[in-house]
Image: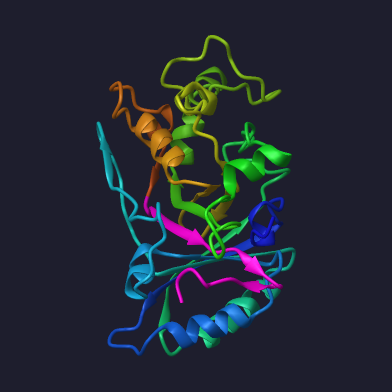
Amino acid sequence: MNAQPGLLAEVPSHARYLTFRRRPAAADPRPALERLAALPVDGARVVGLGASLVGELGGGIEGLRTFPAMEGRGFSVPSTPAALWCWLRGEDRGELVLLGRLLRRTLADAFEVDTVIDAFRHLEGRDLTGYEDGTENPTGEDAVAAAVVSRSGEGRDGSSFAAVQQWVHDLDRFESFGPTEQDEVIGRRRSDNEEMEDAPEAAHVKRTEQEAFDPPAYLVRRSMAWADAAREGLVFVSFSSSLDPFETLMRRMTGADDGIADHLFRFTRPVTGSYFWCPPERDGRLDLRAIL
């Protein structure tokens, strides 16, 4: 497997997510991307390219597209495309700051930072509501099959598609629910993480049961908690060999298929939504042959 190492690695203690936009009237982005590709690929960084950048380069990545905006009753799921995305991963926040500075310098003539989110692992990998995140993630070879592109040719095999959303929680509202109601929103008992057989149809687990779809909507979640001075929530990140499984799950969550919206929307909202193609690695460097 020649996927970027950080893609399937366990969630780190700390993370910094950066999105970049193209500088207005900037020069050809190829030299900046070639410098980025020359940096060693390791578990400290995952890089993804957006559809607008791939299109500007004149290349084509089958299956890459712009994140679709969606709506439900009383809420919306926004589309906020970006040219480039970097997930910086590590055990020391200072190192992530320095890695971010390196990326800024590497890309400075063609790209500028659009957004920065600092995130962290809560307990053993829980959402700030206290519930475990990613319980049904595939593991081992199943995770590779779900997350990594294969049989697509050189420069594409080993790549992956990322769906990224920043969710803002209203924890005051969630905490106003009683313990039983909280469990029913998620569809699992917080006490032991067991799925509730009698959970409501709108419970999050019922809405996103991956094997319940045809074909199954398998993807690998690598989400992390985040907080700033005024807000907190979850940075949702999933990797898959196609963007179709994520859209299948998101349509189900919004109630587009059956009119039943996920109970998550009772206390949290996504404020961003982006898709990225994460190129493979080759000889310890990003393999950008498919687009350069």
Indicate the position of residue 142 as horizontal and vertical percent values.
Answer: 67, 37
Color style of the picture:
rainbow
The quadrant in which residue 187 appears is top right
Which one is nearer the viewer's eye here, 51 or 174?
51
- Name the residue: 34% across, 61% down: 81
Res. 127 visible in picture: no
Q: Is residue 279 magenta?
A: yes
Circle count: 0
Residue 259 vs residue 271: left or right? left
Q: Which quadrant does the N terminus fall into?
A: bottom right
Indicate the position of residue 192 as horizontal and vertical percent values.
Answer: 71, 23
Indicate the position of residue 57 as horizontal and vertical percent values.
Answer: 37, 75
Residue 121 vs residue 247: left or right? right
Res. 65 visible in picture: yes
Q: Above or below — where is 291 with respect to 250? A: below
- Name the residue: 38% across, 74% down: 21
Q: Above or below — where is 27 with respect to 286? A: below
- Name the residue: 62% across, 31% down: 136
Q: Residue furthest top?
A: 198
Q: Is residue 107 magenta?
A: no
Which one is nearer the viewer's eye here, 195 or 1?
1
Q: Which residues are magenta?
A: 271-292
Indicate the position of residue 77 as horizontal and vertical percent values.
Answer: 32, 45
